[in-house]
Amino acid sequence: MRAKSQCLALDTVATRVDPNSTFNLHKSCAEELSCEIEHPIHSHKLKFECKTGPSTELFTCNACHQPCRLAYACSPCDLALDLKCASNWHHILDRKKPHVHQFSVLRKGIPFDCEVCGKSQDSLPYLCTICHLLVGKECTQSLVLPHSIKITSHQHRLWLIWFLEEDYKNDQICKICYTSTNRSRAVYECDRSHCDYVAHTPCSRDKITRTFDDDR
């Protein structure tokens, strides 16, 4: 009799195709999995890999940080995505959601510009391999920024975004300090169609009168 358990691809009950294996997959899932994929969060191709032994150390998904037996992985970069996160990449990279991924500390100090506050840094950088964010230590805490805010200097709600260049040209000016937003990817913007209000996150913090956590 074939053993039944959760399909590792879909989390629904599946029959174990190979009685000698230690995990379960729907036959259709096994047939549809690509051996290699190109993924927008990583410059290298990701290869399908599985860790099947009962004592084998599992992958840890770089997006949701959960252990998994099946993953699309880049071994040289030590990056792995479980099957759900690999297929649901638009949610991982949603630039209008609060940042939720863990940071890795680069043990070698290098000069860099923090992509939250825009200031030059000479300390150890903190890197998010999912979003490709390089930030200073202090700003890893500020990444728990409110999703939406009201400030004293603008009549509409402002929304936190991470990738300003997708919506605007590089010459956008912060409407609070009147300097360029080029050096800071994290900003608050007004999403009204007739309004181009944009402000650095550090500039906005001192003017917040109300915060919101709801989605657009």
Image (tube, rainbow, N blue to C red):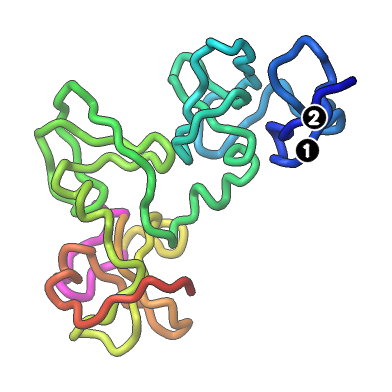
Q: Residue 65 shows which numbered tag?
A: none
The residue at which mark 2 appears reads as: 4
Where residue 72 sits: x, y (%)?
Answer: 60, 26
Which SS class for mark 2? strand
The answer to which quarter of the image holds residue 34 is top right
Above or below residue 150? Residue 138 is above
| Chain part drawn in magenta | 172-185
- Decide: few, some or many residues near mark 2? Use Cα within 10 Å; few <14, some 14-19, many ≥20: some
Residues at discs 1 and 2 in contact (Cβ within 8 Å): yes
The residue sitting at the front extreme is 1
Vertical relation: 111 (above or below) 98: above
Residue 13, numbered circle:
1
Q: Judge from the rendering whether residue 181 lies leftward or rightward of residue 99; answer left or right.
A: left
Tell which residue pokes out farthest to the left in this image. Answer: 122
Mark 1 and mark 2 lie on one chain; the one further toward the N terminus is 2
Q: Quadrant of residue 98?
A: bottom left
Q: CA distance from mark 1 to mark 2?
A: 6 Å
47 left or right of 168 in image = right
Residue that appears at 44% across and 20% down: 78
Please rate how many residues cluster around mark 1, counting C-alpha atoms within 10 Å: few if below 14, some from 14 to 19, many from 20: some
Residue 93 place in picture, x, y as percent: 49, 49
